[in-house]
Image (cartoon, rainbow, N blue to C red):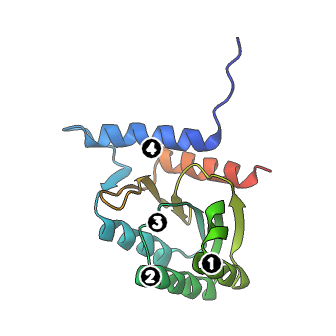
Amino acid sequence: GAKAAAAPGSTIIDLAGRLFRLARQDGMSYPGLDVLRDRSLILQYYRKLQENAVGEIKAIDRPPYLSEGEDEASQADVQRIRMAVGVRYQTIYHDSVYADPLRFAAILTAISGGEKARVLLDPPVKLLISDDDRALVAVDSSAAAPIALLVNPSGLLDALVTIKSHIADDP
């Protein structure tokens, strides 16, 4: 019988999971991939990828969130500054944003500043792509032990960019 095609989001999750398992095996490495296991380091790269962008940030934003309070305000400032110098933001948000008045207000502010935003019921992954040349993918967003993959120029990055565009184009 014919097999149903996997949804683009499940492909991202499956691929990220397989690469993470490979990356943590002794002696195994993938040159296009760095494993980040520290909350402050993940937030640092999240900010750095945006600060270094010159064209476009593409993101899928979903809970759980590593940044709260001061970190969240700092992130909003980075986005506002980057958009002011011409960096385009295209973000897909999880529908839980409607239940969080502060987060929803921040999103409305970003949209008024030029962000293209969309809300999906349950986007499959947390992802940030900077100028289609680097990405940050959350593998585990738990506050206790977050893990993210920093994806450098590679076939994996090309696949993430393609899959993100398919999710963004879905009706």
Residue that label 4 marks: 16
Gap in angstroms between the C-alphas marked 1 and 3: 15 Å
Mark 2 surroundings within 10 Å by alpha-carbon count, few (fewer than 14), some (14 through 19), many (20 or more): few
Amino acid beneath label 3: Tyr
- Mark 1 vs mark 3: in front: 1
For label 1, the SS is: helix
Is 143 on the left-hand or right-hand side of 137?
left
Residue 69 marker: 2
Quick one: 147 or 158, which is closer to the camera?
Answer: 147
Is 60 on the left-hand or right-hand side of 169?
left
Quick one: 127 or 134, which is closer to the camera?
Answer: 127
Viewer can see residue 149? yes
Residue depicted at x 31% and y 71%:
40
Residue 93 marker: none
In the rendered structure, which disc, 4 or 2, sits on the residue that comes first in sequence? 4
Give the quadrant of residue 5.
top right
In the rendered structure, which disc, 1 or 3, sits on the residue that comes first in sequence? 3
Task: Tell me if residue 26 comes above or below residue 118 in the rendering.
Answer: above
Task: Tell me if residue 30 comes above or below residue 161 in the rendering.
Answer: above
Gap in angstroms between the C-alphas marked 2 and 3: 11 Å
- Image position, residue 150 (x, y; %): 39, 57
- Image position, residue 74 (x, y; %): 46, 84
Mark 4 surroundings within 10 Å by alpha-carbon count, few (fewer than 14), some (14 through 19), many (20 or more): many
Residue that label 1 marks: 101
Residue that label 3 marks: 65
Gap in angstroms between the C-alphas marked 4 and 1: 32 Å
In the rendered structure, which disc, 4 or 1, sits on the residue that comes first in sequence? 4
Amino acid beneath label 1: Pro
Residue depicted at x 51% and y 61%:
63
- Mark 4 vs mark 2: in front: 2
